[in-house]
Structures are given as C-alpha cells and as structure tokens.
Image: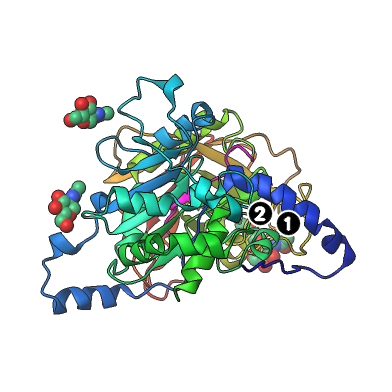
Amino acid sequence: MISRRTSCFTGRKLCKSLVISLLFLSLTYIFLSNHPCCKTSKPFSTYLKLKQRKGMTPPNYVTNISHIFFGIAGSSKAWNNRKSYIQSWWRPNITRGLIFMERSPTEHFPWASTFPPFHVSEDNSKYKHYNKHLPFVIRITRMIEEAFNAQSKGVRWYVMADDDTILFVDNLVEVLSKYDHRKYYYVGMRSESIVSNCLNSFDMAFGGGGYALSYPLAKAVARNMDSCIKRYPTLFGSDHIMQSCIADLGVSLTQEKGFHQIDLHRDISGFLSAHPQSPLLSLHHLEAIEPIFPSMNRYDSLNHLMKAAKIDQSRLLQQSICYYKKNNWTFSVSWGYSVQIYENIIPPSFLYRPLETFIPWKNGASPPYMFNARSVSSVDPCGFPHFFLFSNVDENRVMDHIVTSYKRKSPRGLPTCVSNGSHSADYVSKIRILSPVKKYIWHDGSRRECCDIVQLVGMDSMAIKLRDCMNDEIIA
Ligand SMILES: *[C@@H]1O[C@H](CO)[C@@H](O)[C@H](O)[C@H]1NC(C)=O
Ligand SMILES: *[C@@H]1O[C@H](CO)[C@@H](O)[C@H](O)[C@H]1NC(C)=O
Ligand SMILES: *[C@@H]1O[C@H](CO)[C@@H](O)[C@H](O)[C@H]1NC(C)=O
Ligand SMILES: CC(=O)N[C@H]1CO[C@H](CO)[C@@H](O)[C@@H]1O
C-alpha cells in the first residue's frame, strides 16, 4: 500500500493547509472528477502508413462514433440536476454508452429514450478494507471494468466522463481517429490549476474533463482493477487511482488540449475567447462558474453554445485575429462564442493568452495557472476590449459562408484610446462572422485561420470573413 502524499509547495501556509485541502478536495472530487488522458500525439502520417501496410480499406479503418463507448459517472441523486448537461451532447441511438448509478433511479421512471441507458454499479463491499477514500470513489474507478465487461464488441475507445462533463462528440471522433486504437493510449488533459495538478498528478487526465482509453489499455486496466484498488487505498480521486494504475502498466498520458476540466471560478469568458489551437473536446464545472452567456442561466447558456456547435464543431472556440487598419483596431474572434475589439494594435502572440476574467480554483500557487494569463486593467482604454457574444446563426448562407452574429455584451464605459489615433468603437453593436461552409480540417501542422474585415454593414455593425492564411502571411 502506497500513500503518495507529497508536499506540493514549500512555505508554511500550504503545508499547514494541505490536510484541510485534502479533505476539501476529496469532497470536491466526489462531485467533480474522475478521469484523465494523454501526451504527444502520434503523427497522422503514422496512422495512414499503418493503414496502407495492413491493406485496410479506409471505411472500415477510420474511427467513427459507433466505435466509442461512453461511460458516465452519475448518481440517481444528482440526475435531476445533471440530465440537462448530458442531453446537450448525448445523441440517442447514435452514441453508445451507459450512465453508472449507485442504485436504480426509480423516481425518474419511465426512463426516456433520449437519456443514456443506466447501469447500476456493482456492490463494492469486498473492498471495504481498501476504501480509505470518500464514498463512491471505488464505484467510479470500477466504471471502466464494468463498461468493458458490458460492451467490448466493436469498441475502439472507452471515453470516461462525469455527469457534468459536456462532450463535443464530432471533435472527439476526429481527434481519436488520429491514434491507432490497437495500441495503448491514455488520452486526456491535466487541470488548468497548478494546485490541482500538484495535489493529484501533473501526468493525470482529469476525470471531469473526460478522457479516453484505447481498447487494449481499457482491457488491461479492467483485468488489473482488483489489484489496482488494493494498491491505492488512500488516493482521493478515482481519476488519480486510474492514472496510477495506468502508469503502473507503463502507459503515460497523451495530452489533448481540447479537454477542459475547468478548474477555474467566476467568469471564464477570457478563457473561452483564447482557446488553444486544438479542437474543443469538453467543458466541465459549468455549475462552479458563472453562466458563459451572462444574460442566460447555465442550462440556456450551454444550449446556446450548442447552437453554434451543431453548425460547425470544427471551428468552435477557434481563435482568429485580424486588424482594421483604418482605425488601428484589433479583432480577436472565438468562433461561436465571442469577438473582442481592441482600440489598439496588439500582436496575436499576446492575444493568444487568455484575458484573466476568472479567478483561481484554489489559492496556493503563484502563478496559479498552467498557462500564461493576461491581466488587463479594466480602466485601460487601450488594453481593455469591447466584448461581443454569440447571438445567433443565420438561416441563410452568404457567398458559401456560414454567418454567425455576435452582440455587444455591455457598453465598455471607458474613454477612447487616444494613443492610436483616437477611434472609438463604442458605436459598434453587432459583428457578423462569415466562415467557410467546409469544415476546418484538423491535422498536425495546420495553422489557425486568418481573417479580413470585409465591410462596414450599416451604422453599427461590422463583418469579418475567415479564410486560410496565405503562404508566409504574418498576422499583423
Ligand atoms: C463505423 O464503421 C464501421 C466499420 O468499422 C461500420 O460498420 C459502421 O457502419 C460505421 N458507423 C457509422 C455510424 O458510420
Ligand atoms: C431509438 O430507437 C428505438 C428503437 O428503434 C426507438 O423506439 C426510439 O424512439 C429511438 N429514440 C430516439 C430518441 O430516436
Ligand atoms: C495608428 O497608430 C499610429 C501609432 O500611434 C499612428 O501613427 C497612426 O496615425 C494611427 N493611424 C490612424 C489611422 O489613426
Ligand atoms: C498604446 C499604443 O501606443 N499602442 C500602439 C499604437 O500603434 C502602434 C503601431 O501602429 C503600436 O506599436 C502601439 O503599441
């Protein structure tokens, strides 16, 4: 039995609070977490070569939605609150999987066909001597074992998620299909919070963000579950137990930046407006943050984002930057979510850092995040942007482009930035983005898309068109 309790930070404050943190985190983990994932991705070319060598015909080889089994950590108690999250992404009769519950959710019968089928978790009393965790950590850890035993025919990937994880299924298929599912893969992402990673592991895929195990790895984990549970009786998260067992099998995390644990608080608009150049795969913790569209509640906010997701997941939250030279303005687009206008010329390299609209999940590390956040004074007219949020998708295509609209979030309430020619953007109330109907093709070595300010439409709106960058084009 191994108790891995490392001190994450020196300094008495943290050491002292570690015991309290552990307790708090345990509670948090019960609700929030259970799985993780990956490291560096095998080049797509490896996959193609392999396909050729084996003489496999592409249609049979390419991973599709029916090759993925979703295991969702649920509970009958939380179902009422969580079902809307699951329904936002679950596709009845298309997605395969089960939601695992501690008992039959009889109060919710008849069980709708729009829900994932439920599975009552096995009894775990045989592990009571190894259960130094909080309740149901072992139950959730064993989900992969029960999922594997329940269904393995035609399954290439087991994706594990929480009942408050939002998955972006088309992107997930796209991303998983670049890996050879016959090898050992543990694909996921660590937390945004340094403290969370330190208390668990920097090499762990966080369960709330969701993670994927390839078939052979899922099989190996399932077969070794019993010894694994006995080896790690004190770890507080099932995702940490999973990571430990997978590490013991000699497999390390393959990171995919689109999985989001969202260990952040309050307003995450800055984070969602500067997504890494990677397909969006998941969102989590929507109950722990403010609604992502402040004029709506959490469920409506999520369903609103899903309107854009239904049109084009490949571009969802992808960032493009362009300049309106006539006014010395900078535009930063996060497709399907937001547009920011700066009354100033700001280089892309700077704008790819999220504007720090949020606060840390937990204090204790400085800096607190796994990425470079950009803090901007809300009274600096040259640094603080005008913010526009996704409002709708037009029914009609324009010049073979999809048109999404973004409305001003609120008046900026600042004077004009004078150092760059004094051009106020206060009058702009609406922005339209024209994006190609053709989905963005993700592959290793691809670039972000470029954009152009195409026209001034009317008195108070502007239009931007996304396009491929030209060879050697620098965005400036
Ligand atoms: C997925 O691929 C399999 C072949 O591996 C095929 O039989 C199945 O019809 C495909 N499913 C979908 C939804 O495309
Ligand atoms: C799923 O398929 C079953 C059986 O074919 C059908 O009865 C049910 O209505 C379908 N559910 C949805 C939501 O399409
Ligand atoms: C843009 O900013 C530069 C540098 O401050 C300034 O010299 C130039 O005149 C400005 N252009 C316009 C159109 O305002
Ligand atoms: C505040 C300020 O002076 N911002 C920019 C104005 O524009 C020039 C280039 O046109 C930038 O170099 C400045 O940083």
Label 1: how many Cα within 10 Å (few below 14, some 14–19, many 20+): some
Residue 382: percent from left, percent from top? 72, 54
Ligand 4 quadrant in view: bottom right
Q: Residue at 64% of width from left, 40% of height from top?
A: 288
Q: Magenta segment range?
A: 277-288
Q: Quadrant of the N terminus?
A: bottom right
- The residues bearing labels 1 and 2 have C-alpha atoms spaced at a distance of 6 Å
Kind of residue at badge 1: Ser
Q: Residue at 46% of width from left, 48% of height from top?
A: 161
Pointers 1 and 2 in contact (CB under 8 A)?
yes
Name the residue beneath numbered marker 1. 375
User: Compared to 460, does 245 lie above or below?
Assistant: below
Question: Is there any visible trace of residue 403 in the rendered image?
Answer: no
Kind of residue at badge 2: Leu
Main SS, magenta residues: loop
Q: Which one is in front, 156 or 104?
A: 104
Residue 355, disc: 2
Magenta stretch contains residue 278: yes
Q: Residue furthest right?
A: 12
